[in-house]
Image (spheres, rainbow, N blue to C red):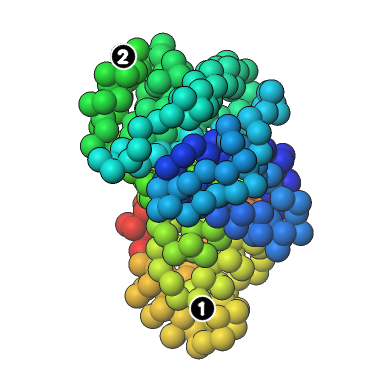
Amino acid sequence: MDAPAAVVDAVFLVQPHALLLDLAGPAEALRLANQALQRLGQPPAFRLRYVAAQPQATSSVDVVIGGLQPLPERLPPGAWLFLLGVRHPQPADPAAGAAERADQLRTQRWLHAAGSGLLCEGGRGRLVCICSGALLAAEAGLLRGGLRCTTHHELLDPLRQRAAGAEVVDNRVFVIDGPLASSAGITAGIDLTLHLIQAHCGDAVAASVARTMVVYLRRTPNDPELSPLLAHRHHLHPAVHRVQDAICARPDAEWSLPRMAAVAHVTPRHLSRLFGAHAGTTPLRYLHAIRLALAERARGEGARRADAARDAGFSSEQQWRRTRRALGRRSAAGPAAG
């Protein structure tokens, strides 16, 4: 089991007409990550806060969000600041009054100071732009110095105009450039948040959140390959998930097909059919891919070869080598492993 993750202050900047899903999607993913950690006997990893220029704001769907905290004088070290998209202005919208314009200016100045600190602190802090939240970052003068970013496909050109010093990337679900993280439209914010959860809390927690939210852990062609601990999870079958969870929790256990079938409460033959139909692999190949990934991770972190093999569940270094030849680095993580 991974060590408990450090607590992150996840601060959501809520502006008038904020897209409600840009707020609820990432926030719910972080809440579910805390819930998954609690089930593992670990403390929560995220402390959620919602800040704004005023105590309440009307969202994109006219739901009023109340109880918002004032803009803090400074963000805690290592905070993640989420910038939410806002809906396009509508012809029927009243013109902004003096008080609203003053709030906008105050928020922009605050965002410039807070965002600059996160981008320059060199720590765990992040500036997370969801959908058109990247435009807010650009207007605050934060997207400069060749930073790579993205946004909703309809807003790529406006982002290029407002962030002339940034590299705006097309056709990506999300882009991460150091402490700056940005996503394409709306639901891509959930994909980005899942990726951040995986990096901070580990594969098992991210997989649990994705399964609860019934979303895939997507990657674009230029992103790293999906971790083997997250692969073969794009299904909803509870028995297969029970076996996968049990293997990930105890990869070094004496797993056999009958023991896996007992976890699933089905026969070994039926379990093999379920894995093939829903996970695209076999139970034993899934087990071997998990052990291979864990052994190579431990080896990359400096563990002795014999220790890495033993802790991952291999009986010997020879078995590790045989498994690596049988699966291969690439096939162990992707559909070819089935």
Q: Is residue 171 above or below residue 74?
A: below
Q: Secondary structure at mark 1?
A: helix
Measured in 3D between alpha carbons, the distance from the residue under mark 1 to the one under mark 2, in whole angstroms, is 51 Å
Residue drawn at x 60%, y 49% as measured from the top left: 66
Q: Relative to residue 155, is residue 183 drawn left or right?
A: right
Picture quadrant of residue 121: top right
Is residue 310 among what the camera can see? Answer: no
The quadrant of the image that shows the C terminus is: bottom left
User: Which mark is on residue 164?
Assistant: 2
Q: Secondary structure at mark 2?
A: loop
User: Which mark is on residue 306?
Assistant: none
Disc 1 target residue = 239
Residue drawn at x 43%, y 52% as measured from the top left: 62
Disc 2 residue type? Ala
Q: Relative to residue 251, is residue 212 drawn left or right?
A: left
Disc 1 residue type? Ala
Where is residue 304? Give x, y as percent.
67, 38
Residue nearer the viewer, 79 or 330: 79
Where is residue 57? Give x, y as percent.
52, 43
Mark 2 surroundings within 10 Å by alpha-carbon count, few (fewer than 14), some (14 through 19), many (20 or more):
some
- Mark 1 or 2, closer to the camera: 2
